[in-house]
Image: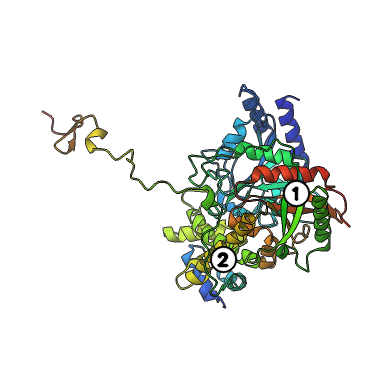
């Protein structure tokens, strides 16, 4: 695995990160060193283990039931007056006076 | 001593310890205000009058929160982290915000935008990281306890390097609400103390379910075990993978001494194996950067911290802000995280790392199900290293986490306890417990603490 300066420029674009041109080569070499190191994680065909992190012991999933959402109520209940699909509001100045 | 006197004395000690560069934000006035606030509580809480230092990635309304990054320079949170509210309700005084590796990424506190932290025991050496400022202030006697955070050993490792207690709770034991996110599946607010008892009391105060953090476990706050600990009948597993041939001779001598002590106290020592230990550091350095790349996407110059001037294009402003705001280690990790999550590489890196994480967790589960009560390991492969020794090679810095990262991936509780010194440098022993086994772990650590010469030379 070799990450070139142009690979790094592409990654920087994906990460929305400006990297000055004179730092591309150095940073590419550093990232390449890290990626090569973590690349040793080829585990082959060992059987998979179920998730065994403590979080799965302590944190239970919530019951899969539908509960009312506080804001989920008829539109009419959001305003003092609602008629024929419209909110009724006080007449404001300049809107069709006598 | 009155609370006002505690506040004044703490401010004086912080002033005298400026040379360590361990505190980023504090003031005599803010400490005095804390004393007034605690006085007004009207009750004596379990941490009444304890000045506690806070890592700078835990948000506070009264002091800035920068994560030791230019990106957040001067940022002040509109709310407190849950752990801050709980400390204050227990009567503690927020003493200061502490220096750290930028966004908690590092193992030496050399990656702070505001300069490195000195190890109080040897200023030429690092205090460990990323919570190095908190560890240094506890080691220097400035505060009795401090909060840090762990993503992959960032409290246990500096605790070992500075010769203090460092406790990482089970993932889900303590609320993460208000802890600036780095690796959300790993992050844990953790505790430093000068003694096991002090660290335990702080952990009790901050633990418990929090409606503001859905990942907290539905359990009541931790209760310390009041019964006198008896090691007879306790089985300690000693994993062979944590005692490699090239283990530092001082660390080996300290561990040999502890294992003999455990036997003398009636504990049973059993050699065990955690076969996937070697995969822990590479697994961590895939998963943590991947999560960091996603979590740090929010720093775009719009909602937090600095904003770079970059023409009229908003995307250019994002890129310029992030390029200027993040330091070298954060940039490296964002780029590695982006790489391992990118199309074509996701399965090869992230998928493999998730599978490896499950295997690491299963290793621990098998041992605890087979009757092992606690694991004993060294916390670090060497005592504190010299500043500058590892900054040129990120991977060598990552390998300083070799004994702490597996526990973080498994989400288990663990702690570091000082067990002696080699050429004046502290050596830490790590205890690892089953999930939510903090009370027993702390009780047993307390029994060992009472018998170990933590500051004597081990060879």
Q: Where is residue B435 in the image (x, y as percent from the top left)?
A: 60, 50
- The disc at residue B356 is 2
Q: Position of residue B422 (x, y in %)?
A: 85, 56
Residue B195 visible in the displayed image: yes
Residue A89 placement: quadrant: top left
Q: Position of residue B192 (x, y in %)?
A: 70, 44
Snapshot colouring: rainbow
Q: The disc numbered 2 marks a residue on which chain?
A: B
Q: The disc numbered 1 marks a residue on which chain?
A: B
Q: Write down the residue under mark 1.
A: B417
Taking the spot 35% from the left edge, 45% from the top edge, the residue there is A65
Q: Nearer the viewer, residue B115 or B451?
A: B451
Q: Do labels 1 and 2 share a chain?
A: yes
Q: Quadrant of the C terminus of chain B?
A: bottom right
Q: Which of B396 and A48 is in front in this view?
A: A48
SS state under label 1: strand
Chain-order first, disc 1 or disc 2: 2
Can you name the residue that lies furthest to the top here? B42
Contact flag, marks 1 and 2 (Cβ < 8 Å): no
């Amino acid at each position: 695995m070799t990450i070139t300066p142009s690979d790094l420029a592409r990654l920087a674009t994906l990460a929305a990160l400006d990297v000055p041109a004179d730092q591309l080569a150095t940073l590419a070499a550093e990232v390449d060193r890290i990626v090569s190191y973590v690349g040793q994680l080829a585990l082959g065909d060992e059987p998979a283990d179920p998730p065994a992190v403590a979080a799965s012991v302590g944190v239970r999933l919530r019951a899969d039931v539908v509960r009312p959402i506080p804001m989920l109520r008829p539109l009419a209940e959001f305003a003092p007056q609602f008629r024929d699909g419209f909110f009724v509001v006080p007449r404001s100045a300049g809107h069709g006076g006598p | 001593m009155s609370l006002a006197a505690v506040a004044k004395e703490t401010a004086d000690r912080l002033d005298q310890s400026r040379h360590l560069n361990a505190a980023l934000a504090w003031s005599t006035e803010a400490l005095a205000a804390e004393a007034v606030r605690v006085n007004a509580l009207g009750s004596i809480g379990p941490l009444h009058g304890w000045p506690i230092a806070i890592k700078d990635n835990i948000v506070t309304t009264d002091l800035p929160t920068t994560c030791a990054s230019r990106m957040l320079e001067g940022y002040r949170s509109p709310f407190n982290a849950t752990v801050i509210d709980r400390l204050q309700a227990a009567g503690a005084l927020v003493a200061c915000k502490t220096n750290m590796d930028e966004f908690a990424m590092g193992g030496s506190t050399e990656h702070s935008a505001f300069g490195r932290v000195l190890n109080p025991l040897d200023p030429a050496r690092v205090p460990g990281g990323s919570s190095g400022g908190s560890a240094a202030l506890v080691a220097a006697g400035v505060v009795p306890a401090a909060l840090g955070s762990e993503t992959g050993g960032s409290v246990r490792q500096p605790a070992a390097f500075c010769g203090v207690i460092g406790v990482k709770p089970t993932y889900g034991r303590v609320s993460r609400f208000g802890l600036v996110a780095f690796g959300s599946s790993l992050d844990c607010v953790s505790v430093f103390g000068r003694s096991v008892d002090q660290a335990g009391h702080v952990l009790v105060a901050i633990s418990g379910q929090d409606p503001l953090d859905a990942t907290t476990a539905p359990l009541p706050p931790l209760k310390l075990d009041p019964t006198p600990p008896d090691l007879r009948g306790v089985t300690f597993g000693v994993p062979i993978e944590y005692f490699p041939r090239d283990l530092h001779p001082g660390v080996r001598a300290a561990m040999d001494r502890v294992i003999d002590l455990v036997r003398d106290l009636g504990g049973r020592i059993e050699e065990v194996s955690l076969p996937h230990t070697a995969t822990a550091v590479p697994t961590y350095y895939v998963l943590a950067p991947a999560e960091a790349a996603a979590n740090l996407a929010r720093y775009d110059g719009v909602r937090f911290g600095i904003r770079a001037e970059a023409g009229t294009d908003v995307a250019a402003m994002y890129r310029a802000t992030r390029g200027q705001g993040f330091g070298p280690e954060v940039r490296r990790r964002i780029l590695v995280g982006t790489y391992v999550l990118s199309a074509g590489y996701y399965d090869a890196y992230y998928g493999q790392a998730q599978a490896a994480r499950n295997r690491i967790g299963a290793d621990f589960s098998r041992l605890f199900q087979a009757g092992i009560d606690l694991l004993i390991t060294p916390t670090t492969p060497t005592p504190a290293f010299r500043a500058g020794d590892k900054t040129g090679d990120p991977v060598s810095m990552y390998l300083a986490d070799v004994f702490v990262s597996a526990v973080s991936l498994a989400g288990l509780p663990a702690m570091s306890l000082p067990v002696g010194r080699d050429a004046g440098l502290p050596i830490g022993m790590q205890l690892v417990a089953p999930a939510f086994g903090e009370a027993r772990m702390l009780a047993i650590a307390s029994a060992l603490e009472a018998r170990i010469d933590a500051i004597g030379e081990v060879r």
